[in-house]
Amino acid sequence: MHLAMIALIAGSTHFLVPLGYYVYLKRNLSKPWRLNLDYNFSPSVTIMIPTFNEASLIEKKLDDIKAQMLSAWRMEIILVDSGSTDGTAQIATEWSLRNPEVDFTVITESTRRGKAYALNTGLHHAKGDIFVMTDADSSWVQNSLTAITQYFSDSSVGAVTGLKQPLIIGAERGGIEPTYRSFYNIVRLAESKIHSTPVFNGELAAFRRYLLVKNGGFPTDVGADDSHAATLLALNGYRAIAIPEALIHEFTPSSRIGYLMWKKRRALHLVQHFVRSISDAWKASPNFRKVLRMETYLHVVNPWLLLMSFVIFLLSVMIDLLSPLNLGIILAALLTQVLKPTRRALRAWIIEQMMLLFGSLTGLFSRELVWGKIEELRSDS
Ligand code: GDD
Ligand code: MN
């Protein structure tokens, strides 16, 4: 077969499978939740913040959580700090003295073994029916926590997460992060309507505590602790959903290299999560099985088709630049650049694919279960 034809088939598969999935998801977006919610439900809640060197952000984060606490609730905050050298734990303890009405525990681990270990320490001390994890460098839109807890009034719900609204500091990078988020938020919601989404946002992720404990806590060998813990519950038949009423703000790194390294690590962690989950897909309900298989394909296999298509196309061009098929492919590629929305969407998509490829490759050498800080996210605030 002609090389350009092979490139075209691989490339078309790469783009058409996710597009088909997206169309299928959009059709499910308006479906009902099939949940019985009680808006007076008020379970006890543990909010857990793992920290490593978050001195510049931690007070604001604690104030933000306090602002969302309802006095009627039985709520506690647990902070587990892993050997910070910038005084994070002391600042948190001082905050606690100024806010004695808040049930707040600061636990310090002398060595840093990674976020998942800290989560498990927090889980061990937690008393709430619902265990909510959050990151120091994120905040929640008002009432997000209330909405999250209400969904647990249906006993089939095992885990609930929020959707992201990115905040960008520094230079605008062609709107890549907002484009990426608006697309993925639709995906997360529609998958949740179908049954469950296998991708959770650790900036606001809530779990029924006894189920987490039953599953042995958070996995310490998979970077995406949030998504993996939620998927394990979904594999056990519980719903693991993202809801539109809970919104998260997080900062996006402003330098290009910081942004790419940040995305690369997150991509690697998702690949680890899917590689680990897929062998248990047979356990899932038929609806979640479909979602899990497709997402695994999209994260683990599909990016390689794009690379393959690109390399084969380059070979084809080197052999015979002016073949009609080669010229046709070049023309089609140029056409995608004419309209701004397609240009932006394609750019965001391709960067994501590159991060999944790069992440998978670097994952052969390091799992990045303990990671470096993106300092620019913290220093500006
Ligand atoms: N205790 C403890 N120990 N906390 C840690 C450690 C650690 O070794 N490493 C990171 N943290 C804390 C950070 O202080 C922050 O509060 C939170 O964990 C998230 O770390 P970030 O450095 O902000 O990483 P991120 O923004 O990319 O995190 C996202 O991806 C992770 C997986 O790659 C979030 O979705 C996380 O929830 C997710 O685990
Ligand atoms: Mn972060």
Image: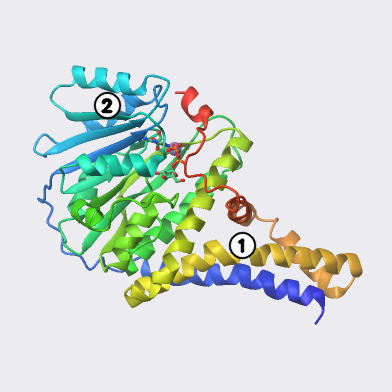
Residue 68: in sight, yes or no?
no
Q: Is residue 90 left or right of residue 256?
A: left
Residue at x 65%, y 55% (from the top left corner) = 339
Query: Label 2 belongs to which residue?
Result: 63
The three-letter amino acid code for the residue at tag 2 is Asp
Residue 168 percent location from the top left of the image: 50, 35
Identify the element where label 1 is drawn: helix
Is tag 2's residue or tag 1's residue first in the polypeptide sequence? 2
Is disc 1's CB within 8 Å of ligand 1? no
Q: Is residue 78 above or below residue 179?
A: above
Residue 348 percent location from the top left of the image: 59, 51
Residue 257 percent location from the top left of the image: 63, 37
Q: Answer few, some or many: residues within 10 Å of disc 1's Cα (few below 14, many 20 plus, some between 14 and 19).
A: many
Q: Is residue 74 above or below residue 94?
A: below
Tell me how far mark 2 sits from mark 1, CA to CA: 41 Å
The three-letter amino acid code for the residue at tag 1 is Pro
Q: Is residue 247 left or right of residue 292?
A: left
Mark 2 or mark 1: which is in front?
1
Residue toward you, 4 or 361: 361
Q: How is the image coloured?
A: rainbow
Residue at x 50%, y 46% (from the top left corner) = 178
Mark seen at residue 303: 1
The quadrant in which residue 73 appears is top left
Report the number of discs: 2
